[in-house]
Image (cartoon, coloured by chain):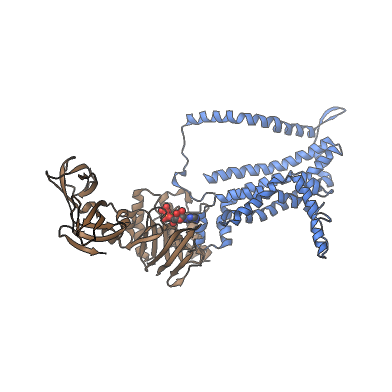
Chain colours: A brown, B blue
Amino acid sequence: MAQLSLKNIGKSFDGTDVIRDISLDVEDGELVCLLGPSGSGKSTILRMAGGFETPDRGAILIDGQDVTRIPPEKRPTGMVFQSHALWSHMSVADNIAFGLKLRRMPRREIQEKVAGALELVGLADYGSRRVWQLSGGQQQRVAIARALVLEPKILLLDEPFASLDQHLREHLREELRDIQRRLGITTLFVTHGQDEALALADRIVVLQGGEIEQVASPDQMYRAPETRFVAGFIGSMNFLACDMRGGRSDHAVFQIEASVSDGPVELAIRPEAIVVTPSATSTARVHRTTDYGTHILVDIDLADGTRVKAMCPPATRLATGQPVSLSADRVTVFRGTEKLADVAPVEMREVAHV
Amino acid sequence: MTTLASPDRSIRKGGQAKRHGRGLTGLLLVSAPVMLLGWLIIYPIFNAIGRTLFVKGDAGVRFGFDSYHQFLTDGYSLSNLWLTLWVTAVCAALLMATCLPLALYLRFAKSRVAALVQGLALFPMFVPSVILAYALIRTIGPNGAVDLVLNAVGLPKINSPYLTPWGPIIGLVWDNIPLTTLMLVAGLGGVSDNAVEAARDAGARHFALLRHIILPQIGNAMLVVLSFTVLSIFSAFTLPYVLGPASPEMMGPFMQRTFSQVLDTRMAVTQAVITFIICAGFGAFYVRSIAKNREARR
Ligand SMILES: Nc1ncnc2c1ncn2[C@@H]1O[C@H](COP(=O)(O)OP(=O)(O)OP(=O)(O)O)[C@@H](O)[C@H]1O
Ligand SMILES: [Mg+2]
């Protein structure tokens, strides 16, 4: 269907750089999630792709065609706004039909398309309702149908599920994923929920302060974060400060070997990478356990006062205050924001080296 | 009016007992203004109507519609009434034509010029009508500033609107621009940016945007504005008095002249009652629009 390219985009509002220099290619039929903390410029990028803001620098291309200066009404993009932005003076069907009517499509055809779009989002019988008679989730689906019915080349969604409850959000997320797959529509999706990004995306773009931190597939993003920020932002992560000397870490619990120059570093360890075993001689003690059913999360106080989270199998039985020993089967070493090495300490083997 | 119909907008029914209690407090709160209204407005209205319907003759008090009959069969009175209605209609149309674009600009423009335009649009509000009237005479009156400029560059004088119906029209439109614009901007505030952007995204250009999205959403606000301006223009006095034609004349000056120069008190009151009835019609329309507006907002 279509391909979207952002080339060295920059945007400032009132003299402050909101987007610094961003380049991104969204491939045909791909779903890319923009993920980042509040104010990182996600909406701004999306609005530039939709034509609601004009970038100060760089170019936006759709299928190789420069659309940077083309207004939204002439762009082959469809946007779903966070606030639904349905038109309350029209019925549900009229909301969806509006764009088709502007295109002077024959009435019969419009009716068919509207019915099809309503069917697609599971609201087949709701065409004659007023917008305000719908629930939040239904309104959101109408907004999605309204964007889809115009068959945009690029679908843009700005936190479309943010105002919904967890259950509905997961449900709509799956529906959206199905529809997007079925239609093969190129999609740029903004969210600040990492679970949403991990569940939906073909690729995730993590943004911070108007710059791209990392672009990767969800599993890569989780398993191989490239920067300190991504490591802390996606999923939960234990960060342990220590010094490297002669290729060895001086941490009391996690001694690793990596060919890293001497100096202070941080060891980043996922909770599920930590193996907890009871050991009477250890100085680390269980602070608290939380049973999530599928796993047990254990907070452990180390001798130096830092607290580590570890994820254990549901059968684990640990008492508060019990001494335990810890080992990690995967550690990433960061210095400042930069990743130095990926280490699997069991084999004491260096995986990557920057 | 509102675009974002969120699920919690449904009306919940509170307990009946609680409602009654609240109703009583409400009644107490409105009782003072209602009493003032009765004393200063309602009573004089009925008093005035009474004075037009009952005449003290030699044979005691007599009931009759003769003063209304007199008004409605008098060609001069009728042409005054028509002139007033016509001026009001033209003013309302011109006001909408000037203020709607202005309000749209103020609502949607993001530039710094918008603040300046807003200031300029509100400026007439701070100029008293009398001063405005004389300023207009000095500029577009006979041998006014415009004529002087035209004369200086060798062009013929303008056909001055002073002492024609266009005199008060120009003055009234100018005088009412700020309030009309403000009310329209307030109405446009109910149209969310996202609703407009979504329409543009669907392919609506300027005109389609205005016609299908913006106007329907501010329809009620426009009715409120319209009835409000009609009310204030219909009963205007100063500008028609100073700038308007002598014959036919607008209702304001007409009443005043009938009262203080012709000294026909009963006729003046009759004219006032007729003016009042027409205004009350618009007033009812105004109240209805506001009520509808509220309903739509819920
Ligand atoms: N129209 C504007 N004028 C001035 N500053 C703006 C404007 N729009 C956005 N900004 C600024 O740009 C920055 C990024 O905004 P943006 O809306 O893109 O953030 P976001 O990543 O979408 O955040 P959120 O998750 O809270 O929606 C913010 O600091 C914001 O203050
Ligand atoms: Mg945003």
Q: Residue at x 68, y 52 (%)?
A: B95
Q: Is residue A46 left or right of residue A194?
A: right
Q: Is residue A300 left or right of residue B109?
A: left
Q: Is residue B158 visible?
A: no
Q: Residue furthest top?
A: B60
Seen from the viewer's position, the closer of residues A263 and A295 is A263
Q: Is residue B130 visible?
A: yes
Position in image of residue A215 (x %, y %): 33, 63
Seen from the viewer's position, the closer of residues B169 and A337 is A337
* Quadrant containing ligand 1: bottom left
Q: Please tell me in which quadrant of the rendered image residue A173 appears.
A: bottom left
Seen from the viewer's position, the closer of residues B73 and A225 is A225
Q: Residue furthest left?
A: A280
Q: Residue at x 46, y 34 (%)?
A: B14
Q: Is residue A306 left or right of residue A192?
A: left
Position in image of residue A175 (x %, y %): 35, 57
Q: Please tell me in which quadrant of the rendered image residue B280 appears.
A: top right
Position in image of residue A104 (x %, y %): 53, 66
Q: Please tell me in which quadrant of the rendered image residue A63 appears.
A: bottom left
How many labels were placed on the picture? Answer: 0
Seen from the viewer's position, the closer of residues A252 and A94 is A252
The answer to whether A48 is drawn above or below residue A320 in the figure is: below
Q: Is residue B159 left or right of residue A51?
A: right
